[in-house]
Amino acid sequence: MGKIKSALLNNKIAQAGLLAVFVLVTAAAVYLMDKSVVAFLLLLGSLLLLYYTTFSNTVKWIVAGVLLIAVIPFATSGGPSYDAYMEVATQCGIYIAMALGLNIVVGFAGLLDMGFVAFFAVGAYTYGIFATGQANNFISGELFPLSGGTFWIFILIGGFMAGLFGILLGLPVLRVKGDYLAIVTLGFGEIIRIIFNNLEKPVNITNGAMGLSSIQPPNLFGFQFTFPHQFYFIVLAILGIVIFAVRRLEHSRLGRSWKAVRENEIAAQSMGIPLIRTKLTAFAIGASFSGMMGVVFAAKQTFIDPTSFTLVESTTILVMVVLGGMGSVPGVILGASLVTILHLQVLTEFTNWLNQLSMQGVINVPTALSPAKMQRLIFGLILILVAIFRPNGLISAKNRKVSLDRAHEQHSASSNAASLNK
Amino acid sequence: MISSILQTLPQVLIDGLALGAIYAVVALGYTMVYGILELINFAHGEIFMTGAFVGTSVLLLFQSFGWLGGMPAWISYLLIILIAMMFTGALGVGIERVAYRPLRKAPKLISLISAFGVSFVLQDVVRFIAELKTGNYIVSSHSLFNQRITLGTSSLGSIFGDATIKSNTIIILIVALLLMVGLDLFVNRTRWGVAMRAVAQDRETASLMSINVNKVIVLTFFIGSALGGATGVLFAQQYGTIDPYIGFILGMKAFTAAVLGGIGNIRGAIFGGFVIGILEMFASSNLGILTSGNFGAEYKDVFAFMILIIVLIFKPEGLFGKAVKEKV
């Protein structure tokens, strides 16, 4: 086994061949079969395989792009369950972007935010209120609903609003010690939900528990986005930007100060890092990713109400980050995909299968034990087990190495130049 | 407006005292664990909830055996509380052993995540069992003491209205008082209490003074969780219906109480519990009147969290706590 592994690691052509065969087989299976969750998951797994190849980063990104933009949409378009597959992929994208946002807060800056879904709600309601007739209640002039063309601007506005809420929450809260932060953000998540649930009087802003319905779908030059396979591309585009931004941020001056604050606040402060400002930017940037995806979520569902933004949702996102590996971008992407798929596909399919079995009378599973209801148990167990046995997650975070020789060379080169100039 | 607030004031105070006593005893569990391990025991709210369920199921069991008629109600009440305390105490010790002890040297973030996971697991396990046994996860039980006594508070002055007090409220106050005084005596007067305070002050030095730190931590978890379980029984008896998710919000409010009184400070936690309880009752019955119907009782939870945030900003060490300088 070890021999095969080392032979594969040294032989790029073999890797490419293996990957191509894997993609071809799984894509063909997805294309030809009516509905096969396994084949679809294996096709998505090709991306993980790609991550473990030894190609250069550019090649990996190009191949991943081809897989995501062309191969996966084409392969799934064959059968009647096209939109079911695409729905899963779209949800994955939304959750990955949110998990990457939370990863900035929890993974990079080490601030445990347990009410993260509040920012998602802010984004969703920002679009929801103005893209339905709801805003007519407090802005006169029957201007609303705004047309679907404004969706693209609202992605930015939603991100901005969520970022603003992040700063508003962060300003008082980030002064307190780390472990209080967890409980305050937990409270904040609940406050936002309670407020959205009750803000129908004195002015009807959120329509309370009834929620907002028939939200305008996005519209680009007259083209309406209504189906999941159309939203897939919107999500993919935003996700691309988010991943690019996160990777740039991680190794920037700001990213390094986040990590310094995470490791030791006092030491970081004495190295001249402005503590509050650094934490606030982490809060604001993380929140804005979540807000952007909130806008997409509202447009995709065309209906939102406060039950979509509960504590369980916040925890789901936290589980994604913890499972994948706090502070590790590829890890968080993997964690988010795994948890979303588990949540949407595996648990529901398993429940359906069990229900079929009990209908046929093979076994009798009481409804109390139906796996679809077990989210809390599963997520709780994942949190405990990962914390105890694998605190770095599935793919642990790596700091970019700066080779000592190169640093020396640069240093001596500059000092040589300085001495020459004398 | 003021007159209507004053009319209901005696009732608000009595209900607030009952709720405050519950918060105070739950807050004790948070504050003890935090004082010793510097860890927010997220699962404590769920331990309270488990206590409520255990108490209710023991009550139902007694009922099905027909024992309730055979002995005085206060004996069965006492038995139920004791059984619930033993159960939740053991549960707390188990949680510490499985989910917290392996992480004692790990970063704070990791142990918080584990604690959060425990609370989710407990919620779901209790839901399974309740749903399997009764078909519904919302369980209601009958109250052992449900006489209502009318207090003639209107004789104090015509601006006050009359208040009614449930006999269970009196029991809550008595039991809570006994638990609090007992804990205070235990911590301040016994050898184990001295050991506990020593471990809270400096774990390593305490271990050099031949104190078995692990034993002290286990004892702390046992006592804190048993107190939580006992309050769960009182809560179930007072309000009648329980579900597996009551622990979460109540736990957060109790934590607010602990922070308000200065976390790690036992008397502070008791004071904080009563303050939060009375303020919450006041808010839930009067917010609607004060804002002329625009914001009603549904904002009472928001109110409690606002107190938490305000305390953390202006006086993070709490009313009775000592400000701690952070060491490098």
Image (cartoon, rainbow, N blue to C red):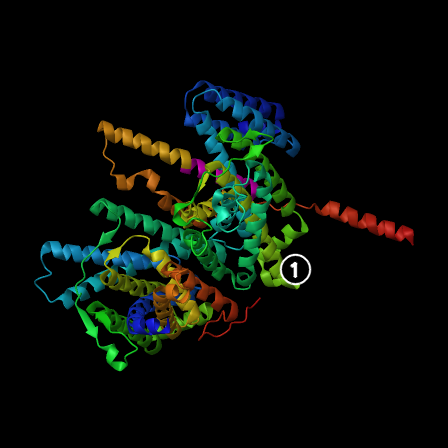
The magenta stretch spans residue A67? no
B8 left or right of B255 in image: left
> To which residue does mark 1 refer?
A273
Above or below B135: residue B18: below
Q: Position of residue A249 (x, y in %)?
A: 64, 47
Quadrant in the picture for the N terminus of chain B? bottom left
Residue at image position (29%, 68%) is B15
Above or below B36: residue A317: above
| Most common SS among magenta residues | helix
Q: Residue furthest left?
A: B70
B294 left or right of A266 in image: left
Q: Front-most of B35 and B135?
A: B135
Whether residue A332 appears in this view of the structure is no
A72 left or right of A344 in image: right
Q: Amino acid at mark 1?
A: Ile
A383 left or right of B142 in image: right
- Label 1 marks a residue whose chain is A
Q: Front-most of A123 and A219?
A: A219
Q: Residue furthest right?
A: A422
Q: Position of residue B132 (x, y in %)?
A: 23, 44
Residue at image position (55%, 36%) is A148
Q: Position of residue A193 (x, y in %)?
A: 43, 52
Q: Position of residue B123 (x, y in %)?
A: 33, 51
* Secondary structure at numbered mark 1: loop
Boundaries of the magenta span: A328-343
The magenta stretch spans residue A338? yes
Whether residue A413 appears in this view of the structure is yes
Quadrant in the picture for the C terminus of chain B? bottom right
Crowding near pointer 1: few (<14 within 10 Å), some, many (20+)? some
